[in-house]
Amino acid sequence: MSTSTSGYAATAPSATPRRRARRGAHTSGLGLGLCTLYMSVIVLIPLAAVVVQAFNQGLSTFWDSVTTTVSLRALGETLLAALIVAAIGAVMGTMVAWVLVRDQFPGKRFINALIDLPFALPTIVAGLTLLALYGPGSPVGIHLAYTRAAVIVALLFVTLPFVVRSVQPVLIELDQEVEEAAASLGASNAITFRRIVLPALRPSILSGAALAFARCVGEIGSLLLIVGKVQIASIVIFDDIEGDAPHAAASLSVVLLVLSLLILIGLRRLGGRVAH
Amino acid sequence: MACAGWGDALRISRPATLSLRAVALLYLALLLLLPLGVVFVRTFEHGIGTAWNWMTTPAAVSAFWLTVKLAAIAVPLNTIFGVGCALVLVRGHGRGRAVLDSLIDLPFVVSPVIVGLALILVYGEQGWFGKWFVQHGIPIIYSWPGMAIATIFVSLPFVVREVAPVLIEIGDEQEQAAATLGASSWQTFWRITLPSIRWGVAYGVVLTTARALGEIGAVLVVSSNVAGQTLTLPLLVNQRADQIGAGQITGAYSAATELAIMSLIVLLAMTVLGPRRPESR
């Protein structure tokens, strides 16, 4: 589901045989050109248009637009929600990964496959399921819909696989002899976990949580039905677009874009994996 | 499973193991299974007939086919681009590769709403390219071509990101051997490269399909949201759930069940194809 090491260009075989270089030079240039063209038409030019729109009335107008009460509150709500979700997701995701790797119980394969459900299920369905469960007429008598709590639950749902799928492979590869050695030297479980297991897992937990955080910052599909009046940034941008205020929408978008880019760069520095 | 038969390195007592297991499974049940179960129950609470009627209204049928159409456009295009781009990134040797490589992941981190906004600014009536298209009678935004571009955008990197690691792993010795024996680049690709990356491609296609079928944020912004014309199944769920009317919510649940069934099929394909999944190691 997840894995993809970044930096393929750098990892390509360095000792490229001269013969192939001669033969493929033109095709490679053409391929690179076509790929760049496709990326430009679909992704790069449109994103550039957002940046242009945000700044076309000058820097001060952009600044005024992102520092309105609405924008600032939206950014605050979004970042807070993303932080909470990343934190809960890190703890629960690690626990789920642990149980899936180290525990044995019937139905484990099914549970393991189930982890990917939030990636496969359309996000609007995720939102509707939460509305069905926690909305008006809730069968369990819990009314969370249209509150911050509902936003947190929805975001926990859509980001569940990130930490689990990031920690799981590392946990499988982990050398258990070190843990055995620690235990035989009298370390308690808590100490063994904190001193041996956790440091080994930390990069994968961190990159999983960062991906979850990034996803939260931009998420909209699962929130549409349950967000109510909670001012999440993506919803505010959507309302601005619908309300024919492209400049306000573009300005807030640029802030979110910068945030996402920083996370992307941070993950690459971490040598981490970029999932989706 | 890779972990079968491992000793208990952390000697966790039986009760502790059981409670960890219970907490993890309860969390998954509350977060994943219970909500999904409720949707199925709500869909069929007024009988299968009612649910079936909601699934076969003209709006629902049109939404189903539009969803399929958008996926049918986005998946092949992104697959061709994905394989080509992975080849360029891993096997090519141009200066621009590093830049392209770092830009590929952008669609994963950009909010879908921003994707919609970006497409309006470029392909909308007032947009950079939009004016030309409107003058030539080709509407893009608020009709299906815009929705198709939005779908392509959000599902763009999956195939590249699945195929590139496989290309690195298989190396290029066989390709070089084929070239030495006189095969053209084209022959080498079809006879050697493609067969060895086919599972990676297949998995990338499954992920692309899942995303294309379920996308809502970007598509919502560039759709005119007219039932029977520019509603996809996710948009239909959204619209029906928002409308207050007798039974509309059952309609929303019915459309959601359709999508859920589609995604269960996708999930099954993921489980079967998942190339580097932990359990298959």
Image (tube, helix red, strand yellow):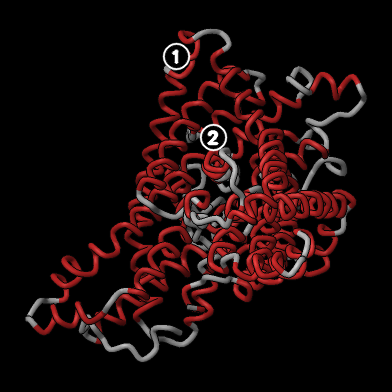
Q: Is residue B96 positioned above or below B76 on the image?
A: above
**Residue displayed at 48% across by 59% down:** A141
**Residue displayed at 21% across by 85% down:** B13
Using the rendered image of the protein, determine whether residue B248 is visible from the camera's viewpoint.
no
| Mark 2, residue position | A234
Give residue A63's mark. 1
Of the numbered discs 1 and 2, the one sitting upstream in the chain is 1
Residue A194 horizontal/vertical position (percent): 18, 66
**Residue displayed at 42% across by 19% down:** A69
Residue B167 horizontal/vertical position (percent): 59, 63
Residue occupying the far right of the picture: B137
Residue B20 horizontal/vertical position (percent): 31, 75
Label 1: few (<14), some or many (≥20) within 10 Å? some
Location of the N terminus of chain A (image quadrant): bottom right
Q: Chain of mark 1?
A: A
In space, the residues marked 1 and 2 are separated at their CA atoms by: 18 Å
The answer to whether B126 appears left or right of A122 in the picture is right
Which of B72 and B254 lies nearest the eye of the viewer?
Answer: B72
Q: Considering the numbered disc 2 on the image, is that residue within a helix, a strand or a loop?
A: helix
The kind of residue on which mark 2 rests is: Ser
Using the rendered image of the protein, determine whether residue A145 is visible from the camera's viewpoint.
yes
Which of B129 and A77 lies nearest the eye of the viewer?
Answer: B129
> Which corner quadrant of the image does residue B48 belong to?
bottom right
Labels 1, 2: front one: 1
Q: Considering the numbered disc 1 on the image, is that residue within a helix, a strand or a loop?
A: helix
